[in-house]
Image (cartoon, rainbow, N blue to C red):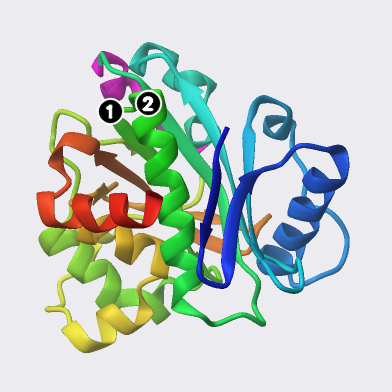
Amino acid sequence: MLNLRKGRYAARIAATDADLRAAQGLRALAFRGAEGLDTDPYDARCTHVLVEETRSGALVCCFRLLPLQSGADIGRSYSAQFYELSALSDFDGPMVEMGRFCIHPDWRDADILRVAWGAMTAYVDEQGVEMLFGCSSFHGTEARAYYDAFALLRDRHLAPKRWLPRVKAPAVFRFASRLRRKPDLKAAQAAMPPLLRTYLLMGGWVSDHAVIDRDLGTLHVFTGLEIRAVPPARARLLRGVAG
């Protein structure tokens, strides 16, 4: 069972109903800016990972994992509600969907993200996962604030055609076809969510459109990462944290 300690932080799998409620509470705060619980039917199917500050026990980050035997099960994923993913049904290796990733808004330490990715790396290695995927979220639903980031995604990080998700959600921003601007690289990087930035550093790719999710108040892009495509130096760094 996953149990990772690095510096001030430790990652573990939620073991009790109280652990799950703590994660749902952090999600409500991070995604909705409110007290309460963020819940959905997928919670019962997922493994939930908690990252805590070891001295205080404060929950600083959480995410959930939904394992799939292969792309033939892609329709069971949370992402399949928003993206037409039939192209991925031909993927023949184990997959895992990472969802509801969030960091407590009062905690800014970059080591939190490192420990979270270390935990994810340990899980991927233990389970023999060959593709990691999910929805990477931008705060807010106004695409204009992220034009440079979307233009950079269009130019450098679109999914291979064989895996490219198609439009399914009723409200989307088709940045690959609509944007004509050249991205300002500094502005693009500043606007990129940390989770998505890490995916891209490892060789990840995105859909050609963003879904406008008014329930969570976000714009999100489908994000995929084939594990064998992770650069060796980056994989060594991640396994160094995971170990």
Against 42, residue 14 (above or below) is below
Q: Quadrant of residue 91?
A: top left
Q: Position of residue 193 (x, y in %)?
A: 41, 70
Q: Position of residue 236 (x, y in %)?
A: 20, 52
What's drawn in magenta, residue-wise?
82-91
Q: Which mark is residue 130?
A: 1
Residue shown at 77% from the left, 51% from the top: 24
Residue shown at 73% from the left, 28% from the top: 44
Residue shown at 36% from the left, 27% from the top: 85
Count neighbours of disc 1 (C-alpha within 10 A) and say few if under 14, some if 14 to 19, many if 20 or more: some
Q: Position of residue 59 (x, y in %)?
A: 71, 64
Separation of disc 1 and disc 2 at Cα? 6 Å
Q: Which mark is residue 95?
A: 2
Viewer-proximal residue among 215 and 37: 37
Q: Quadrant of residue 201?
A: bottom left
Whether 89 is among the magenta residues is yes
